[in-house]
Amino acid sequence: MAHPDEIFRPVPRTGVIYVMAQARKRGFAYGAPDWANLGQGAPETGEIPEGAPRLGSIDLDAHTSEYAPVAGDWELREAVANLYNARYRRGKKGQYSAENVAIAAGGRTALTRLATALGSIHLGHLLPDYTAYEELLDAFRRFVAIPILLRREEGFRLTPARFREAALGTGLGALLLSNPSNPTGQLVAGEDLRRFVEISVDLGCAMIVDEFYAHYIYDRGEGATVSAAEFVEDIDNDPVVIVDGLTKNWRYPGLRLSWTVGPKSVIERVSSAGSFLDGGAPHALQRAALDFVDPEFADREARAIQALFRQKRDLMLQRLQAMGLRVPGWPQGAFYCFADLSGLPESIADGMSFFKAALERKVVTVPGEFFDVDPGKRRRHIDSRLRNFVRLSFGPNLAQVEQGLDQLEAMVAEAQAGA
């Protein structure tokens, strides 16, 4: 008789899940007053100054107790299309409709649908990038994941010229891009983003843009948001596909609700994938989300997020610099600092050592090497080039961010004294 281990393959945890498992072994619990979770990939979810009203309950009735359509509730699809038209398509010939939108149960589900729908292509992804991409890109063998190395000395920024070079040099059929980036907070916006879309159209290289942090934009004016949708000329033929949802930009990670915006033919394909992968998003949650994507509601939340999170970003950058941690390319978006530890004492100068030492101080961090995404483990170098980095989140509330920085400052001072 075959043992289950002979039937089921080992499935690795994402970096953040590993980090949290190690923290729990040392006594971490959500809400514990002596712990600071600077490893979290979620924003604070409570009331914030000038923020939009928070959802207090979800109604269930006979209608919402039934399955929703796999592609999503039609009214929500229309509302999402209207949000993109109001923000990014004013005065433009092409306007998104409900047929350009599919609803899914969270960002990973939306990306899995897209991965299932991809053909036999080379799919470009960035290094460093979101840890969950690694297993996602490895699970589907129809396409080949091609890494694009971002340089520390350039602040881990992908320029339009580098995108064109990579697309031509490796024959990319698509690029997966988080914008703003997790973990670096780098942003492609304005003329650069226009050129990205133009290159995508010119070369026939699709752009799959993860825009889950598009409300976390800090240096482009009050309430500014960024989307590739602004620069699409032909909404049904330009190969630009956008994924977003409630998790980050509306601060509802627990609702697990997302959407995909793109050409109608792509929406048909991802909806077909959803029919056998997941069956569609919860009906009641989709109805509850209708108010969230109203342009006035969404813009109010974006303004409030930016005011509060800019304050936390600036505080973290200032404190990290004083401790001797360098941040190449200050984060223009998202809520992370990707910090270089190489200037610290040897005992805490790599991400894993820093992570373990910080746990002893009851602070959670994420080692940088987890963002050295390597689907299929095809690269053979011994050490990750990101081993001297750590990702620190300013997603928690201000008091927890300050507490975590205080505890890290004491840890660094002790290491320096003993060096």
Image: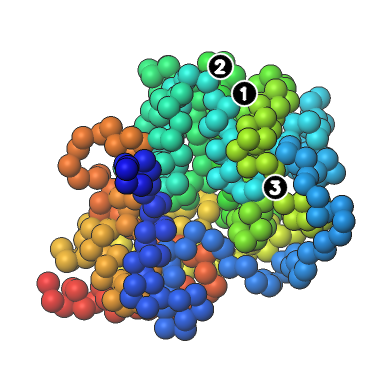
Q: Secondary structure at mark 1?
A: loop
Task: Give the residue number, with chain letter if any, for mark 1.
Answer: 239
Q: Residue at x 41, y 57 (%)?
A: 16
Q: Secondary structure at mark 2?
A: loop
Q: Is residue 117 above or below residue 12?
A: above
Q: Position of residue 24 (x, y in %)?
A: 38, 72
Task: Give the residue number, with chain letter if any, for mark 3.
Answer: 281
Residue kind at label 2, given as amino acid type: Gly
- Give the Cα separation between the discs numbered 1 and 2: 7 Å
- The quadrant of the picture occupied by the C terminus is bottom left
Q: Position of residue 286 (x, y in %)?
A: 76, 51
Task: Give the residue number, with chain letter if any, for mark 2.
Answer: 204
Q: Are marks 1 and 2 in contact (CB under 8 Å)?
A: yes
- Give the Cα separation between the discs numbered 3 and 1: 25 Å
Is 232 displayed left or right of 417 in the figure? right
Q: Is residue 138 above or below residue 249?
A: above
Residue kind at label 1, given as amino acid type: Pro
Circle 2 crowding by C-alpha within 10 Å: few under 14, some 14–19, many from 20: some
- The quadrant of the picture occupied by the N terminus is top left
Q: Position of residue 381 (x, y in %)?
A: 19, 37
